[in-house]
Amino acid sequence: MITTKAELENIVTLTDSEKAWFDDPSSLPLLISDHLAGLMCHEGIRRQFVPSVEEKDEAESLDPLAELEHSVSSRLIHRYGHRVALLTTDRCFSYCRHCFRRRFTGLDSGPISDSEIERAADYLEHHGEVYEVLLTGGDMFTLSDDRLERLLSALRRKRSDLVLRLCTRAPVSYPERFSDELMAIMEKHNEEGPMVLMCQFNHPDELSAESLDAVRKFTRLGIPAFNQSVLLRGVNDDADTLERLCVALLRNRIKPYYLFQCDLVRGTAHFRVSVDRGLEIEAELRRRLSGLAMPQYTIDLPEGGGKVILTENHLIGREDGQLIFTTVDGQERRYPEK
């Protein structure tokens, strides 16, 4: 793992902006896995993981999604009626510089404890309206096999019907984590109740053979894989890059699910693409991609407003009992109102 300036300079030539970060580092530490260190020649990967002084912009909130306001405990967030997020750990195998949970990630709160696991399981037992749990953090797969077994067993013991979303960037940053022993745990608990793998591939250069093999271990168990990309300036803010990414994901049995607008998180403004530009990219992707390959361009609204889908409106008017639409190619079509 790369954790120091000297180690980082052994693999990349730092820019002045990147060097300046080390004079006064942000709260999110430097951490780059050996796997990603071997991919730093790709600019779309380097920009996501090498810190820069631009992170020192502190004009925005550390909690723009109001997670603290909707927290049942220090680890459990209940912001939507039917699903909760469980913060399994603050640790990752590599820290993304666009991290939206900087208020928590990398601050040494560590893995979830036995008492915190039981508290979350008890809460879910008494809240039958919840049917999905996002196991997130940090990255759940930084937990030891033993801790993962305890966590999954506790949840399944109280609620075997829960859909467990396994939220991770480990296939990107540390694909060797998915050992036979770990996958045996995944297989066991997937048989007890449904699981879904939620990946984050942001650039096609992240789709290494090792990363794809890690995801394949889940799909072979019947655990479907979905991808949540973040629209990032200088990484994937063009239709060509995202088209390559989405087609490659689909070919590898990973459904492109979300393309997130960057959250208003302190220290990430330099990654942000305007919504107008995002809508232009979304419209172009709809012309190029099938429905299976097309992610939902989505914004998580500030102050706990929740997720809404951003898309070009093809319903442009009404006339004489007819709805007026435009096709993705700009042609006009009509459909009766009744």
Image: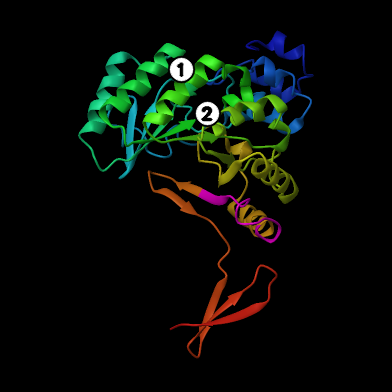
**Name of the residue lying farthest toward the bottom:** 320
Reading the chain from its start, which is encountered first: label 1 or label 2?
1
Residue at the image position 69 percent from the left and 37 percent from the top: 203
296 or 211: which is nearer to us? 211
Specify whether residue 287 is painted magenta.
yes
For the C terminus, the quadrant is bottom left
* SS category of the residue bearing label 2: loop
38 or 56: which is nearer to us? 38
Q: CA distance from mark 1 to mark 2?
A: 18 Å
Kind of residue sitting beneath label 1: Leu
Q: Is residue 189 above or below residue 110?
A: below
Q: Is residue 170 above or below residue 197?
A: above
* x then y, percent, for residue 25: 58, 18
Residue that carries the numbered disc 2 in the rendered image? 168
Question: Are circles 1 and 2 on residues that touch, CB within 8 Å?
Answer: no
- The label shown at residue 107 is 1
**Name of the residue lying farthest toward the left:** 126
Q: Quadrant of residue 120?
A: top left
Kind of residue sitting beneath label 2: Thr
Q: Is residue 35 above or below residue 56?
A: above
Q: Is residue 102 visible?
A: yes
* x then y, percent, for residue 145: 46, 14
243 left or right of 121 in image: right
* Residue range of the region highlighted in magenta in the rendering: 286-298
* x then y, percent, for residue 220: 56, 32
* x then y, percent, for residue 111: 41, 15
Residue at the image position 72 percent from the left and 33 percent from the top: 44
For the N terminus, the quadrant is top right
